[in-house]
Amino acid sequence: VAGQVPASTVRRAAIVALVACMPLSLLSGWRAGLLHVAAVAAALTYNAWLKSTLASPVPYAVAFAILPGFATLGLPGHPLPPSWAVVAAAMLGCGAHFINTLGDLDDDIRMGVLGLPQRLGRSTSLAVGASLLAAAVAVLVFGPRGRPGAAVIVLFAVAMLLVLGVVVSARSKYVRIAWPLTLSTALIAVALLIANGKSLA
């Protein structure tokens, strides 16, 4: 977007990635592989069509919700993922979508990119995105059976602080810091999934 890489290079890289997607996905077995291809297809529908519609969060919800299934279906016995992991992943994806738009909201509106966050406006999108991120982390902590351990509680506290940082930065002149903080929250979510790995299958 900044013009530092020629468009032809980006185009070639995208084609190579698309061609490699099928065989690489199938390395985890056909069940997990087909799920991963479905996630890629959901992402393509966002770019090709849904980005400028009220349904713009749907591809994020679908693609992220698929990820726990990709992880579990590649295991021996091909177990389905628990519902709490699917719900948390979907909320994480939707929350990331709302937060990701904040830095470019005005430019998107000028260019006619009117997805759901752009139509709701900055304040509402921030509230929705931050709430979804916090809810996703909470589900990852309290969704699995049993009491969360000390390490999980620490990760939960760190994630909540990061979400608070997202809200504070997005409401200030440092709005672009909200996205790195969102990515950090996503990393915490991945760590929580790993910490609860035995509960996934």
Image (tube, grey):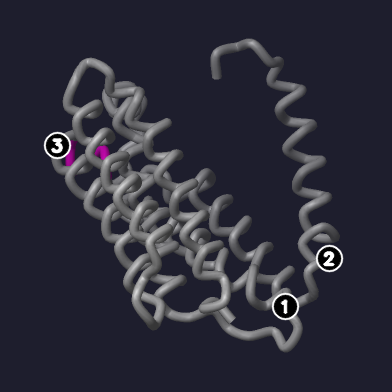
The residue tagged 1 is 75
Q: Amino acid at mark 2?
A: Leu
When the figure is inspected, residue 133 is found, relative to residue 76, above or below; the finding is: above
Q: Nearer the viewer, residue 121 or 145?
A: 145
- In the image, taking residue 29 as reference, residue 109 lies left or right, namely left
Membership of 100 in magenta stretch: no
Which comes before the other along the chain, label 2 or label 3?
2
Residue in view at x 59 percent, y 73 percent:
69
Q: Nearer the viewer, residue 109 or 57?
A: 57
Which comes before the other along the chain, label 3 or label 1?
1
Is residue 103 visible in this depiction of the protein?
A: yes
Q: Residues within 10 Å of mark 1 (few under 14, many from 20)?
A: some
What secondary structure is marked by label 2?
A: helix
When the figure is inspected, residue 94 is found, relative to residue 82, above or below; the finding is: above
* Residues drawn in magenta: 117-121
Residue 123 spot, x, y in % from top left: 14, 36
When the figure is inspected, residue 95 is found, relative to residue 81, above or below; the finding is: above
Residue in view at x 39 percent, y 82 percent:
145
Give me the C-alpha separation between circle 1 and circle 2: 12 Å
Q: Quadrant of residue 180?
A: top left
Q: Nearer the viewer, residue 123 or 15?
A: 123
Residue 108 spot, x, y in % from top left: 34, 28
Residue in view at x 40 percent, y 77 percent:
144
In which quadrant of the rendered image does the C terminus lie?
Answer: bottom right
The residue tagged 3 is 123
Q: Nearer the viewer, mark 2 or mark 3?
A: 2
Residue 30 spot, x, y in % from top left: 78, 76
